[in-house]
Structures are given as structure tokens and as C-alpha cells.
Amino acid sequence: MLLTLVFALSSYHYLSISLFLMSLLWWLKKALKQSLIYLAILAVVLASYVLLYSHQITYQLPNNTKIVELYLDEVTFNQEADSFFGEGKLDSQKVLISGNKIEQLKNQKIAFKKLFIRSAELKPLTKATNIAEFDSQNYYQSSSIHYQLSIKDYRVVSPDTLILFNPISLIHQVRFELKKFYQQLPEPLNMLGFQLILGEKFKELSYDETFKKLGIIHIISISGLHVQVIAKLIEKLLYLLRIRRKQTKIITGLALIIFIFIGNEQVGLVRAVVSYWVALILANVFKVKLNPLDQLGLGFICHSLIDPLMITTIGGQLSYFLVLILILTQNMSYSKQAVYLNLTSLPLLLYYFYSYNIFTSLYNFMAIPLFDYIILPIVLLSFLYPLVPLVFDGIACLLIKLFDVLSYVGQLDYGMVNFGKPEFVIMMLLIGLTIASFTFERMKLGLVMTMVVMYSMAYILIHFPFYGQVTFVDVGQGDSIVLTTPIKRRVVMIDTGGRLSFGKTTNTKSIVEKITVPYLNAQGISKIDALFLSHQDDDHIGDLEPLLRSIKVTTVYYGVGMHRVTKFKSIMQRYSETTTFQALKAGDRREYGALDFSVLYPENPGMGENKDSLALLVRVQDKKWLFTGDLEKDQELAILKKYKNLKVDYLKLGHHGSRTSSSFEFLKQLNPGYAFISAGKNNRYHHPHQETISALSNLKIKYDGTHQYGMINVYFNKFGQWEKRRYQTNEEDYG
């Protein structure tokens, strides 16, 4: 039973979940000894499976309706960008919505709104196109959201009055009023109110990154422990009102159901409330009292009936898994339980988040009681702020001091280990070994030694890989290439990618923070030895500063003369103490392990324009690669004129496959065995151009593009073996 639970919670394989449910069913039948309950649970399991299966069908686009229904408490406004983002309903189907012109919505007093759509674009949510990238399609699938509606023009329509008074609308109205109330509170009470009561972020704060580094991010999210605190407060209040115990339990349970919707239906919140009701019904209706493990299993079945895809989310897996460990270690002391909880969850956290703080157990030991028994009650009492603002202003100042101390500790990076992502099988074995180590005392020493060996092996395999790689990161309409060497790994990047600016900009995360850095972290990479910048365009180096801010870069190379570009010059000045900046020109060479870089262009100082792009000939073992940035045809011909016998095995086409680069003569002389194109899917420039594709076809040069397949990885080892993988198709070629 235990093994099937662990396997079910740690994989997306529905067979393993079904096995867990069946084993739990057998256990509960034995515990309850009532065939009626057995049949009822069986019906629930079968219904859950049917619902789970139904979510796998292909959803059709909604009809061509012009009305979108939404609740403003589910919408986030960006004042700076004059935009909004959230959830709504189109033709009775949930969709993500986004749009501009927020003046019609931001000052509304009623949460429920109908929008008449004058102009909009409806698209299905897309899968992640890079390894370790956030997958919005999978994430929103658990909420039955499959499309995004980009609204270009709309007007607000008055909804039916009766709709405003149904229970769901009233709860959304309460939540809407709470959002407006918490927005007025001083920092960090506003942030805590949003995250601990409403279950969403107020805004991106530096505290979030601090809590992540310390491994205590969960304490500012709604959890089962928070529900227990709130339930006890409600029960105490009802007790003072002399309400009977049975009625108190029912009223508390109903209040917690309302809190589910107020708290944005967070998985941990739903789990705790479902568990509360399971215990209440069994005790008062069936006169049965289950042990905590049985109660967890039955609660899981009920939760799966409510939300069949809950277990496919990280939150769902972690919530049930951590509660399982708490139950298994309930007889231990608080400090010992905290250690085992962190050790057991470590493999799962590494699998999803790649890094860990070795002092997390200590930080949690100190922080959890503080947040759950002091800060959470303060947040719950913050509705008194209008009556005693000075008191809460003082509390807010104390909290800021506390968070500043935490920020200082987080910035020191003490104890942070960038482990990387272990293989799924290794992760499962480590979880099993950890649980076994505190279950079988006689085998404890041997199991602990086995765990140490497995962690060491996993770390070595990640940080000293048998293969190197040339990876074309899908950064949309831009360039970013990662090169690494085998065994004693060296890491080199060519360009960072970045957004091309068209009109207003937003303060959202950069492409490099959302895509490249997670990819590097998943491989255990915490330092880049060298970064080559081809030229000044934003789609090539626009994310230079976020990259330097996120990860250590030893040396940045750029084409001679580009230091005169104002924006680049200011970045050089800000990061000159931590990173070396060097200009390169034709004839220069740099070597990083098995990677040998020769600069073919530019000859003379330029201003970092397309025609000044850094052209790099890279020898990777016995293969030659050529990267030319956005060099145009005239500069390509200049290279051919100087290097008359130049041949390459692999070519990254210039300027994203534009007709302004990659001339027929250039391609013919280089005669690459394979060409790669880095371009955005459905980009506004229509890259790659048909002229370039025709030239490749006429010369029988095979090619792949990030616009077709997402991230493209070319792996090699010390024995001269090469393998190419396309991320979205998982196809493999060998060369």
C-alpha cells in the first residue's frame, strides 16, 4: 500500500494511481468491515476514473460567441502596462483571458461582469518547448482550462440582476472586497493577506525569492496546518457562544468550505477541508473512527472525485506526500519529525526544483511555529486595521524588520546546493530508501549508507556527465545557444535571447529567467564560463542583464567596437566587478575544454549592428560548427574570400533564416551536413524565408528549426558519437 502511494503521488501514470486506489480500497474494506461502504467507495473510485479519463479527450474550440463572463476577483490588473489577465468563461467553457484598456474594469464595484467582445483572438494553450520550462498547458489542464482569449477591444455589459445573488457570485463578491481591503494594508500585511487568505500573489516581492532560497516558501501559502489553526479559532468562538459540539463541527466545516473558494481552491486547503469532513461524517453518521493513514486515503479518494487531475499537479503530489510522512513520523519529537520530513521530501523537491538548502530543516523548525501561531492570527485579525491602524502599522514595521533579516540570510546563500534534476527512477528509490530508514530500525545503517551512495552517484552523473551538448534554446524570435563539454564540464553560451520591444513593456520575468536559467539549473549548472554576444539586437542580447543577475558568468565576449553602444556600456559598468568583459576581432581564439572558438568576423570595430556580428567557428572534437549571428550576405562573402577552403559540419543559419543571410554561394561552399534555424513560431517576420529554405533544399542540406520543434539538443561524447534530439517530438538522429 505504501509503495503504491509513493509511486502514485510521484508520477503522472494513471495506472499507478489506480493501483494505489485499489490497494487503499482493500485496506479500507478491512478496516470498516461494512460492505455498503465498500460498494460506495468502489463507486467513487470508478467515477473518479471515468472523470479522469474524460479529461483526456480533445477539447473543441468554443462557439463563435461574443460574450465573456468573468469575476473580477479572478483578474489581475497591471497598471503600468494598462493590461489585465485572469480567468473567464466563454460559451460555458473556462478560458484564460488577457487584454488592454483596464479603465472599464478597474473601478467596478460588482465582481461579476460580462464583456461584449468586439475583437479578440482565441488560441489553444501550448506545451512547453524547452526542457525545464513551465508548461502552461499541463498546469491549466488541471483546472479544465485549454484556451487563451486575447481581447483587443471590448465593452462591459450589465449582467442579469438575479445572477448577482446566487451563492457563487456572493462568494466571489466577498473575495473581491477582501482583495480591495488587503491592497490597502501596509506591506507586508498586504502580501501576507493575499497569500495566506486569498491564495494568490499580491505582486512579485523580493521576499518570495528569499523564502525559496531558505526552503520555507510553503509557510506563506495556504496549507493544512493553516486550516487547522483557522478551524480551532472558529470552534473556540462557537464554544464561547455556547453552541453544542456537534453543531460546532458542522458550522466549522461549512465555514471551511466557504474558505476553499475564498482561498482560491488551493490543493492543500481542499485536502485539509475534505479530510475534516471525512472524519466528521464517519464519526457522526457511520460511528467509525479511522486511523490517520486510513483517513488520508479515504480523503484522497474523495478529493480525486472532486478534482480528478489534482494528483497530476506538483501541489497535489507534495500535499499528500508530506501529510503521509507526517503521519508515519507522528510518534517522533518535533525536531526529529522536521528532519525526516525534509529528508523524505528532498528527492521530490530536487526532481521539480533542482536545488536545496541544507539548513532547510533548521529554518522550518524556527519559522513554522512563528508563522502559524503568530503571523497567521495577525493576518486574520487585520480586518480590525481601520479601527486601530497605528497598532497594525507598528506590527507591519516589525514584520519588515523580520523579513529583512531573512532576506539578508537568503542573500548569503549559505547551504544552497544546486543539485540538478535526478532521474525519475533514482528519485523514486531515494524516497523509498528514506521511508524505509525510519520504518525498519534494524536496517537503518545500511539503508542510510545506500542513500548516501545514491545521492553521490546522482550528483556525479549530473555534474560530470558522460556527454557534452550543443543546445539551441527556443527563446522565440531570437538566438540562445548553450555548449557544454563532457566529464569535466565547461559551459559556454552564445547570445541570451530577449524580447523585441513593440510599444509598451511589462515588468514580467525575462525569457532567460523563465527558460534558460531553469534549463541550466536542471543540469546542475550554476556558473557559465563564457558568454559570446553576437551583436546588440534585443533578440540576441536583450536578456544579458537578467542572466548576469541570475547566474555567475566568468567572462563576456563581444565584437570589437560594441562597447560604444550606450545600453551595453552601462551593463558593463554595473557588472564589471563580478564579470570580465573582453572585445574580440577576427583572428582571436579562445578554448574551453573540448570547445575551441576561432573568431572569423568582425575585422574592424563596429557598433554592434547586424553587419558587425561576431562570427564564431567552433571545433567540437572532430566536428566544426559555424555561428554567424545576424551577419548579412556581404559579410558572409567576405568570410569566404578570406577563408577560401572553409567547410563546416554544422551551421547555425544567420539572421533566423532571413533572405538577407545564408546566400546560395555561402551554403554551397560551407557544405554543412546539417543546418539549424533559431526563430519564433509564427513570427511577424515570417522567418525562415522561403528563399533560404529553397537554397537548403536545392543543396540537399538537412535542417531543423526551433520554430518547428522547440529546443534542439545535439549530444556528443568522448568517443566521437553524436545524437540529436528534438524536444517537442522526442525524435532522435545519429551522426
Image: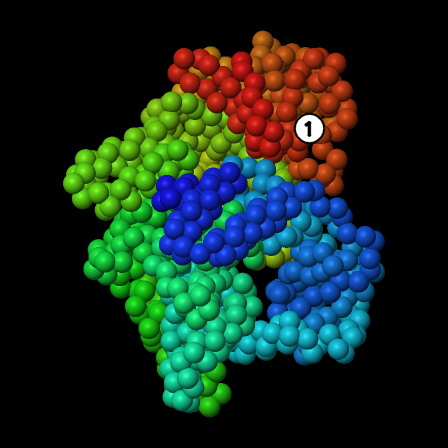
Q: Residue at x 49, y 31 (%)?
A: 482
Observer-nearest of 479 and 476: 476
Is the residue marked by circle 1 packed among few (<14), some (14-19), or many (20+) residues within 10 Å? Answer: many
Q: Circle 1 is placed at which residue position?
A: 657
Q: Secondary structure at mark 1?
A: helix
Where is residue 721 shown, x and y percent of the image?
Answer: 46, 14
For the N terminus, the image quarter is top left
- In the rendered structure, the answer to whether residue 420 lies left or right of residue 453 reads right
Is residue 692 visible in this depiction of the protein? yes
Q: Is residue 116 above or below residue 342?
A: below
Q: Residue at x 75, y 77 (%)?
A: 162
- In the rendered structure, the answer to whether residue 57 lies left or right of residue 594 reads right
Observer-nearest of 382 and 48: 48
Q: Residue at x 72, y 56 (%)?
A: 93
Q: Is residue 354 above or below residue 632?
A: below
Q: Residue at x 39, y 16 (%)?
A: 718
Is residue 568 visible in this depiction of the protein? no
Observer-nearest of 439 and 680: 439
Where is residue 571 shown, x and y percent of the image?
Answer: 48, 48
- In the rendered structure, the answer to whether residue 320 lies left or right of residue 430 reads right
Observer-nearest of 137 and 490: 137
Where is residue 469 shown, x and y percent of the image?
Answer: 47, 25
Where is residue 687 shown, x and y percent of the image?
Answer: 72, 33
Residue type marked 1: Gly
